[in-house]
Amino acid sequence: MTLRFPVAPNPDAAVHQPLGFAMREHEARSLCGGDEVSFVTAWVGPPAASVEAVMALYQERLAGTPEHWWSILPVAPPSPGRSGRPRRIPQARPVFRDGRRWPEPDPAVVPHSLWRLNIRYWRTGPDLVLPPDRAARKLRRDPTAAEMEARALKALAEQPLRPEGPQRALDIGLFEMRPPEAPHIIMPDE
């Protein structure tokens, strides 16, 4: 079985009108005419009360397609508070009463899950911002980093952590060093 993912400029187009399906980056790039592509995960459509409701919204599009590029996942509902932050649920304490260890849940406090379609696809388009090649710790010291666009900063924050270089040899102890004139020798540091 080959895992192929849709190629599209946005999540809605990936579900409804993809340019095609590609397994590798070079295949996705050839499908979109040589533009840059990146593999992303995104939410599609409004949240619904159940998995069946989400399937009803996308039944004709997702029927018969493999499930490796889409999934229906639970999402937390937005909080009714003014700040927009999720409300804090108090931690339950054991009661050990009437043969029960935990108290009955309070329906006003228990959050209800909503369900939403989540897809993985090859994103392409003119507004695509690829993360910089440099490591984030070096970029934040750069004086030009203050002028970066918001999209570039978001892409930088979402990129996986990568090492700056290959891992150094572990045969050098705490009190040993390599002299600059002979880096092939390990000397004790006194």
Image: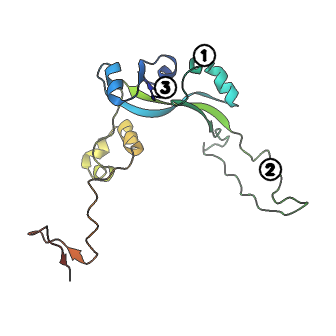
Mark 1 neighbour class, 10 Å CA radius: few under 14, some 14 to 19, many 20 or more: few
Q: Name which residue lies at 29% across and 22% down.
A: 34
Q: CA distance from mark 2 to mark 3?
A: 37 Å
User: Which residue is tagged 2?
Assistant: 105
Mark 2 neighbour class, 10 Å CA radius: few under 14, some 14 to 19, many 20 or more: few
Is 45 situated left or right of 100 in this image? Answer: left
Q: Name which residue lies at 36% across and 30% down.
A: 24
Ranked by sequence position, the earlier of labels 2 and 1 is 1
**In the image, is residue 21 above or below residue 82?**
above
**In the image, is residue 10 above or below residue 169?**
above
Ranked by sequence position, the earlier of labels 2 and 3 is 3
Question: Which amino acid, by three-letter code, is at mark 3?
Answer: Pro
The residue nearer to you, when weighing 55 against 83, is 55
Tell me which corner region of the image, top left, top right, bottom left or bottom right, holds residue 44.
top right
Is 145 situated left or right of 74 in this image? Answer: left
Q: How is the image coloured?
A: rainbow
Q: CA distance from mark 3 to mark 1?
A: 17 Å
Is 179 situated left or right of 14 in this image? Answer: left
User: Which residue is tagged 1?
Assistant: 60
The residue nearer to you, when weighing 150 against 106, is 106
Residue positioned most to the right: 98
Q: Is residue 40 visible from the viewing direction of this image?
A: yes
Ranked by sequence position, the earlier of labels 3 and 1 is 3
Tell me which corner region of the image, top left, top right, bottom left or bottom right, holds residue 168.
bottom left
Marks 2 and 3: CB-CB under 8 Å? no
**In the image, is residue 180 above or below residue 121?**
below
Which one is in front in this view, the residue at disc 2 or the one at disc 1? 1
Marks 2 and 1: CB-CB under 8 Å? no
User: Which residue is tagged 3?
Assistant: 11
Question: Which amino acid, by three-letter code, is at mark 2?
Answer: Pro
Q: CA distance from mark 2 to mark 1?
A: 38 Å
The residue nearer to you, when weighing 143 against 111, is 111
